[in-house]
């Protein structure tokens, strides 16, 4: 006899779906004072439940059910079975309960099961508590009831017929069914959100499925599509379906009076708005399944097969929380990236709005300081797809002191990457990397804490930075113009600007190699990145180790500088030193001429040493490519440096270089 392997499970909050019909005749015949007293009492009870005044955590909601099977649906989520039992009993003790009958109820517990390999690692204790997968499962076990307009609830079980016995299938085959089921659900990300609760041994069916959506036809289309998946067509049995609309307890009197609920919707929704909604719905369905798939959860596999949506397969629900402690990548997002995010897809929020947005995703003020800067990047991918990518970015972000946190979070049908940084500049740098994630559709950015203080500080710093930048730009432009007059390509090799960063480090070169490799992986994601490499002194005289980073745009180089300056052992950038500054000369030498190039540099170096205003010149070699050379030359004053470029020695070197260089040299002003 073969005993099949069950998936591991973990349980969270207990759920009660309490369905009631109203005795309308008795309610209408009751004296006004009785109705008022009963209404006031039950509204207080329901509002207290929604506020979770009875427990440390949980959630509750009230729905108007459509159809003959019930009038009201009350959903409770609480940590213990005793909690939900007490809520049910408290309702029964209200005077209003005498005008209702409990026509159906369902008791269950939120469940995470492990069909995927990553989920099994979680159950085996091989996943950190702050990992993306752990946060995802946490969101499945302790969900929030979303504000979606509609709810659909039904119980279900897996078939156990001789030719269609789910429990007799091998584990691998069941896992394959779940993966296929989840693929369907991911197509409804941002339109349908689900909660799966297990009820084996608790109620008559094996699972309860609760789906939420603003457009109820999205639920219909999701389940219709899933009916054709073998997980449903062959192995699923379904109980009664209940559909309803959410409304606040305060509107219960309006509901009982036959008025539109929620009453706030009735006041806001004009005939024109209804028509626009109908038109938008029709258009969206013409293009697919309607709705905006841009932001988050879906009724993936769970909708017709809870095993798929039970927290096992992080892909099964965009309700994931992938705690990747901070968002970003190695290195700063180059200017091209910042330009891409500088559009309508990035919303600017004030401090209050950003704080509220972060709180919606479970990030609270105790996790950041006033003056920090927040980012929220909404995505339309399922959780597991984001977990790995954001975890990779986080690994690079953690190199930087300005990084506070980055997580993939989910709330009320929205999946987002949340990132907090110590200042706006670092946040904007990270934003470039985060918005480069394919699944990110739109973003929000804004200050945190004391917005006024941050603004004052930012304005002061921005003004100073702008003045310095203006001065630097003028100086650099003047020098480049003069070099062009002298026939030197300064910043415009091959007709395009190249901006260079050079930082010196006292760290062990091998340590720098590893750190820079991580940064370069992030930089290479952007078209503005030319190269980043570690160079060491060819002669070994100076003991210098330099990190050189070349970019197509100045703002990209400036952004990358924030990340590069956090490398170990950094002792300064060229502009941090006294004197005029540094001319950077980059050469790619033909392999056959490498030694000749080095020898010639020695001769030129002797000539340089004799020139007025010359401080030092060093030949550094790329540790990964010995034909890639960088010459850093420092001078007392601008005119001293320009005198070198006007000299015959330099002109002769340039003429000779045409034969030995594999590419056109780059001469860039670094200071």
Image (cartoon, helix red, strand yellow):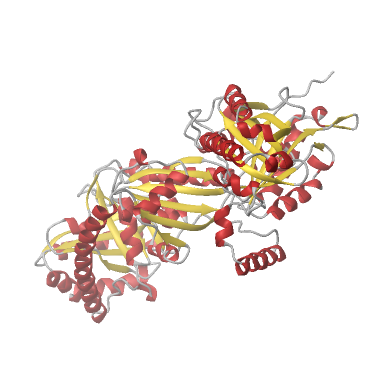
Q: What x and y, as percent, mark residue 611?
A: 11, 67
Is residue 64 visible in the rendered structure shown here? yes
**In the displayed structure, does residue 207 sit left or right of residue 494?**
right
Check the image and name the residue furthest to the left.
612
Is residue 112 visible in the rendered structure shown here? no
Q: What x and y, as percent, mark residue 28?
A: 69, 43
Residue at image position (61%, 32%) is: 95
Quadrant location of residue 71? top right
Location of residue 360 with respect to 336 vertically, above or below: above
Q: What x and y, as percent, mark residue 326?
A: 42, 44
Check the image and name the residue furthest to the bottom.
485
Location of residue 329 with respect to 289 vertically, above or below: above
| Residue 449 or residue 493, whichever sits in front | 449
**In the displayed structure, does residue 525 sit left or right of residue 35?**
left
**In the displayed structure, does residue 578 sit left or right of residue 350?**
left
**In the displayed structure, does residue 171 sit left or right of residue 150?**
right
Location of residue 216 with respect to 611 vertically, above or below: above
| Residue 308 or residue 279, whichever sits in front | 279
Residue at image position (58%, 50%) is: 296
Which quadrant, please, contains the C terminus? bottom left
| Residue 439 or residue 450, whichever sits in front | 450
Q: How many labels does the image show?
A: 0
Q: What x and y, as percent, mark residue 255?
A: 63, 48
Residue at image position (44%, 54%) is: 433
Check the image and name the residue furthest to the top.
1
Which quadrant, please, contains the N terminus? top right
């Amino acid at each position: 006899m073969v005993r099949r392997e069950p998936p591991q499970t973990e349980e969270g909050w207990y759920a009660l779906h309490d369905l009631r019909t109203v005795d309308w005749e008795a309610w209408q015949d009751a004296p006004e004072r009785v109705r008022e007293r009963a209404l006031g009492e039950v509204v207080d009870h329901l509002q207290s439940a929604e506020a979770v005044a009875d427990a440390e955590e949980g959630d509750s909601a009230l729905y108007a059910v459509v159809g003959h099977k019930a009038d009201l649906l009350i959903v409770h989520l609480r940590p213990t079975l005793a909690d939900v039992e007490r809520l049910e009993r408290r309702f029964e003790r209200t005077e209003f309960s005498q005008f209702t009958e409990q026509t159906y109820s369902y008791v269950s517990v939120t469940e995470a099961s492990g069909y995927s390999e990553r989920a099994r690692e979680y159950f085996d204790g091989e996943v950190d508590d702050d990992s993306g997968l752990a946060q995802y499962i946490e969101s499945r076990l302790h969900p929030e009831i979303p504000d979606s307009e509609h709810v659909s609830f039904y119980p279900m079980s897996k078939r156990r017929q001789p030719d269609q016995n789910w429990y007799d299938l091998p584990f691998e085959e069941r896992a394959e069914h779940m993966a296929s089921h989840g693929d369907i659900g991911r197509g409804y990300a941002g339109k349908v959100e689900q909660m799966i609760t297990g009820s084996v041994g608790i109620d008559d069916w094996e699972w309860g499925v609760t789906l939420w959506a603003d457009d109820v036809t999205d639920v219909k289309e999701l389940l219709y599509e899933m009916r054709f998946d073998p997980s449903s067509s062959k192995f699923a049995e379904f109980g009664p379906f209940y559909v309803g609309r959410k409304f606040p307890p305060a509107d219960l009197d309006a509901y009982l009076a036959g008025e539109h609920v929620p009453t706030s919707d009735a006041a806001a929704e004009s005939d024109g708005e209804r028509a626009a909604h109908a038109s938008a719905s029709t258009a969206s369905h013409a293009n697919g399944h309607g709705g905006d798939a841009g932001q988050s959860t879906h009724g993936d596999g769970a909708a017709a097969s809870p095993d798929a949506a039970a927290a096992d397969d992080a892909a099964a629900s965009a309700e994931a929380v992938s705690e990747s402690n901070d968002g970003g990548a190695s290195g700063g997002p180059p200017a091209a990236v910042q330009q891409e995010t500088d559009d309508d897809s990035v919303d600017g929020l004030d401090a209050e709005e950003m704080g509220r947005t972060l709180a919606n995703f479970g990030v609270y003020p105790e996790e950041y300081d006033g003056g920090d800067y927040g980012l929220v990047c909404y995505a339309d991918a399922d959780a597991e797809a984001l977990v790995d990518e954001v975890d990779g970015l986080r690994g690079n972000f953690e190199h930087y002191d300005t990084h506070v946190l980055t997580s993939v979070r989910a709330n009320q049908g929205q999946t987002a990457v949340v990132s907090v940084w110590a200042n706006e500049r670092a946040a904007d740098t990270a934003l470039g990397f985060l918005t480069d994630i394919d699944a990110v559709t739109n973003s929000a950015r804004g200050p945190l804490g004391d917005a006024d203080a941050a603004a004052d500080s930012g304005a002061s710093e921005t003004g100073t930075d702008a003045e310095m930048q203006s001065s630097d730009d003028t100086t650099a432009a003047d020098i480049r113009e003069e070099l062009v007059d002298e026939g030197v390509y300064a910043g415009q090799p091959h007709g395009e600007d190249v901006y260079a960063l050079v930082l010196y480090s006292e760290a062990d070169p091998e340590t720098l190699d590893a750190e820079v490799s991580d940064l370069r992986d992030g930089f290479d994601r952007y078209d503005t990145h030319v190269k980043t490499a570690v160079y060491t002194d060819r002669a070994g005289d100076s003991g210098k180790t330099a990190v050189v980073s070349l970019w197509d745009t100045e703002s990209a180089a400036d952004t990358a500088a924030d990340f590069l300056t956090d490398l170990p052992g950094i002792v300064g950038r060229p502009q941090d030193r006294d004197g005029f500054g540094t001319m950077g000369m980059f050469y790619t030498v033909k392999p056959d001429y490498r030694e000749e190039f080095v020898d010639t540099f020695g001769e030129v170096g002797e000539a340089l040493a004799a020139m007025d205003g010359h401080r030092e010149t060093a030949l550094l070699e790329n540790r990964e490519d010995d034909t890639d050379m960088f010459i850093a030359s420092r001078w007392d004053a601008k005119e001293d440096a320009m005198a070198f470029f006007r000299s015959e020695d330099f002109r002769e070197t340039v003429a000779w270089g045409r034969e030995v260089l594999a590419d056109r040299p780059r001469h860039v002003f670094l200071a």
